[in-house]
């Protein structure tokens, strides 16, 4: 006899990452979690970073340190007082291990997700590598990252396929006048990086 299916657990998630819609997929994942009937409490580190002058912001971004990073981690700790069931960190270069330890002490499960290669310097930080063993689940879209992340202490690594957002990625009408602006033989969709340009050439 088939067992009755358990109702899916509705989880309150403290969700953090670069939530600015332009050029990011982080907000798409947050909205998808909401569509799956979870409740998210968003913390956008891009909004926090925007409060700092450009040069100060760039310096702190490069150093992964400074008042901007302090404020971001303080904001997460303050939000954890609501005792969410999970803390979802998207591209967590600036989340310190102390913040994650506090989240664990508050009973939150910890998830880290990145669609980027963890082993490129631009996508990681000393904070992330120290934090890696604290996450209950680390998600990657890169198959060659799985064993490497496990070797560096990740408790559980999940390989996720690439995806699209049905609200954003929709067919374009052949009559759309903008199509002429983008006429070409090959189109690359993604972030520009010198290595990618050279490889494509």
Image (tube, rainbow, N blue to C red):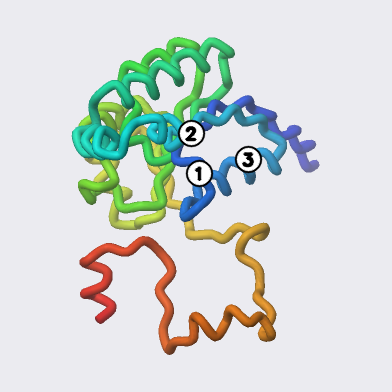
**Residues tagged 1 and 2 counted as in contact (Cβ below 8 A):** yes
Query: Residue 153's image quarter?
Result: top left
Q: Which residue is mark 2?
A: 44
As measured in the structure, the alpha-carbon distance from the residue carrying label 3 to the one carrying label 1 is 17 Å
For mark 1, give the secondary structure. loop
Q: Name the residue located 72 percent from the left edge and 36 percent from the top edge.
A: 37
Q: Identify which residue, 72 or 41, lies in the foreground.
A: 72
Instruction: Find residue 96 and report its horizontal and vertical position in percent.
Output: 31, 23
Image side of residue 90 versus residue 37, left or right: left
Q: Is residue 129 visible?
A: no
**Observer-nearest residue: 163 or 134?**
163
Say which label, 3 or 1, has the lower sequence index: 1
Graded by Cα atoms within 10 Å as few (under 14), some (14 to 19) or many (20 or more), the crowding at tag 1 reads some
Tell me how far mark 1 sits from mark 2, CA to CA. Answer: 7 Å
Residue receiving disc 3: 33
Front position among marks 2 and 3: 2
Q: Which residue is mark 1?
A: 20
Task: Answer with mark 1 or mark 2, whichever residue precedes in sequence.
Answer: 1
């Amino acid at each position: 006899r088939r067992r009755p299916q358990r109702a899916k657990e509705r989880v309150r998630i403290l969700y953090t990452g670069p939530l600015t819609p332009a050029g990011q997929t982080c907000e798409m994942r947050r909205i998808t979690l909401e569509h799956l009937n979870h409740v998210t409490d968003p913390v956008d580190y891009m909004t926090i970073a925007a409060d700092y002058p450009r040069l100060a912001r760039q310096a702190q971004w490069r150093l992964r340190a400074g008042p901007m990073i302090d404020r971001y981690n303080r904001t997460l700790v303050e939000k954890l007082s609501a005792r969410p069931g999970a803390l979802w960190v998207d591209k967590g270069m600036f989340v310190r291990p102390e913040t994650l330890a506090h989240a664990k002490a508050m009973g939150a499960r910890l998830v880290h997700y990145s669609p980027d290669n963890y082993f490129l310097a631009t996508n990681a930080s000393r904070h992330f590598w120290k934090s890696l063993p604290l996450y209950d689940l680390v998600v990657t879209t890169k198959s060659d990252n799985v064993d490497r992340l496990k070797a560096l202490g990740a408790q559980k690594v999940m390989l996720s396929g690439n995806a699209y957002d049905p609200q954003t990625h929709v067919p374009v009408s052949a009559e759309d006048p903008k199509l002429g602006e983008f006429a070409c033989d090959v189109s690359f969709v993604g972030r520009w990086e010198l290595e990618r340009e050279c490889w494509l050439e």
